[in-house]
Amino acid sequence: MQLASCLIWPVNRMRHFGRDEKGNISIFSLTLMVAMIGIGGLALDTMRYEQQRVAIQNTLDRCTLMAASLKQRLAPSDVVYDCMDKAGLRGTVKSVGVTDNSSGGSLSNRTVDATAETDIDTLFPNAIGIRTMNVDARSVATQKLAKIEISLVLDVSTSMEGTKLTNLKNAAKEFVTTVLNNDPDKRISINLVPYSSQVNLGATLRSQYNATYIHGAANVNCFDMPDSVFSSLSLSRTLAMPMTGNVDAFSITYSANTYVFPTDAEWALPRTYTMALTPNMAKGDNRACPALAANVVRVGQQNISTLQTAIDGLIAAGATSTNSGLRWGLALLDPGSQSVFSSLISASAVPSNLSGRPLSYTEPDVMKIIVVMTDGQNSGEDRLNDSYRTGLSPIYKASDGYYSIYHAAQTSSTKYYIPHTNRWSAAAYAPSGGSAVQQTWPQVWASLRMSYVVKQFYTRAFPSDPAYGATTMTNAMRTNLPATTADIQQQAMCDLAKGQKVIIYSIAFEAPQQGKTALAACASSSAHYFDATGTQISSAFRMIATNITQLKLTL
C-alpha cells in the first residue's frame, strides 16, 4: 500500500502541472520576450542604417553642389573626394562623373553625378549570419547660367518729385549695378520702363508699332492702347493704336464768362514741366504724355553706365498709370517682340548678342522678371476723341497772337467768333496788315489747354446753348478711362505674366492703401512684395537684386 501510494503521487503532480495555466504563460512570455528583443535589435540596426544613409546622402549632396559651381576652379571630382574626406567619410566615394557645357566660349552649365557606398556592422541580424548592411547614396547637381530678362517698371509721376525720386534713383542704380556686375557672360538684359500718365516709348521704339493719328509733337511718343491689349501676352505690331495727344485735358481755366488772354500761364497755357520750373508755379505736368526725352523706355540694356545715366535723368511729371507700365514691361519680355528687338539691333539701339530675344517662356534656362514700383494708385486717363486728334481745326490764329473760330452752326452769315472782342465776324480775325492761319488740332493743343478752348471758343460763343456747355463740349473732345478700369487692366497684366512663370517683384513706396493692395496682389508671392518708406526702398531693391543674382545660378 505504501509503495502504491508513492507511485500515485508523482503521476498526480504531473497531471496537475499539465493542467496549470501558469506553465503555459511562462512559455509564451519567454517566446514573446525573444521576439521583442529581435524586433528591438532590428529596429536599432534600421535606425543606425537610416542615420548613416542620411548623413552620407546629405554630405554627398552638399559636396556635389560645391563641385558643380561654375565658379569652382578645382577639378570637380577632386572637390567631391576632398569634401567627403573632410566630413569623416573617407573612402566612401565610389564614382564621380562630370559633364561641362560651354556657350559663347565660356562655361554655361556643369553637371556632377556622384555615388558613395559604405557598410555598417549589424547587431541582432549578426546572430543569424547577417554581419553587415550596405549603405549607398547618389547625388546629381547641375548648375546653369540662366538667361535673365528684366523689365524695371518705375513710377515717375509728379508725386515722386523731390526726396522720393532721389531715393528711387539711388536704389535703382544700385540694383542695375549689382545685377549686371555679376553677369560677365552678358546673359542678362534690362528694359527700363519709366511711366506716369502713360509710357513714353521714344521715337525709335514707337516707330516699331502701327501708330495712327500721328501728331508730330517732339518727344511725345505714347499710345492710347485699346482694351484688347490687356487680354493678351503679346502686343501686336500691326494693331492700329492712336498716339496719345499732346494735350492738357486736366488743367482748369477761369470760370467766369470773361476773356482770358491765350498767353495766361495760370488759366490758358498747357501745364508743362518747363512751366512748373518758373517761380511760384507748383510742379507738375498735366499732359497725358509729358514731352520729356529723359523719361523714354530703354530696351535690352546691358551697360551699367548707360542705365545709370538714364535713371539719373528721370524727371517726375504726370499722373499714375501702372496698368500701362506693366503692359509695356510685359510686352518687352514676350517672345512676340523678337522682331522689335531685331529691328532695334539693326538700328544699333540694342546689343547684337540679344538676337533672338525675348526668348520663349519655355526656353531652357530662361528667367523673366518684372520689378514694378509705384508711390500711388491708378488715376485714370483722359484721351482725345478721334475727331480732335489730328487734321484742321476750325480755329484760326492771327499774326498778333489772337484767335478766332469758325462755327458752321451759327445762323447768321457772320460765322467767325472772336473771343477777345466777344463778337462775330464774316471772316477770321486778323490785325490790320496781318494775317490769320487755320490751326491743326495738334497746334491748338500744343498752345492751349482743353478747358480754355472749351470756354473761350465754344461756351462764350453760345452762352445760352447747353450743347456748347463746358461739360458737353469737354466730353465731345475727350474720353476718360476710369481708374477702376485701369485697376482691372493692371491685375490682368499681372495674372498673364504669372501664368507664364514670369517672376513679379512689386514695391509700394509710401503708397496709399489702394496702391499697396494692388501691388501685393500683383506680386508672385507675399515674399515678392515690399512696402517701403524713405531709404527702405534701397533695401527692397537690394534684396531683389540679391535674389536675382542667386537665381541666375539654377541648381
Image (spheres, rainbow, N blue to C red):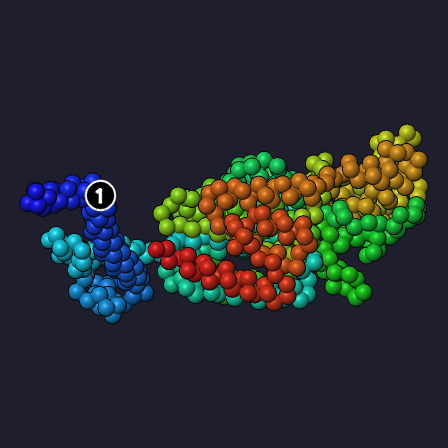
Residue at x 89% of width, y 45% of height: 419
* Horizontal and vertical percent position of residue 380: 69, 45
Image quadrant in which the C terminus is located: bottom left
Image quadrant in which the N terminus is located: top left
Q: Secondary structure at mark 1?
A: loop
* Horizontal and vertical percent position of residue 12: 15, 42
Residue found farthest to the bottom: 86
* Horizontal and vertical percent position of residue 429: 87, 44
Residue 149 visible here:
yes
248 lies above or below 509:
above
Residue found farthest to the top: 411
Q: Nearer the viewer, residue 541 or 424?
A: 541
Q: Nearer the viewer, residue 527 or 413?
A: 527
Residue at x 12% of width, y 52% of height: 128
**Would residue 159 appear left or right of 70 to someone viewing this image?**
right
Which picture quadrant has residue 53? bottom left
Q: Nearer the viewer, residue 501 or 165?
A: 501
Q: Amino acid at mark 1?
A: Asp
Give the residue pinned by disc 1.
20
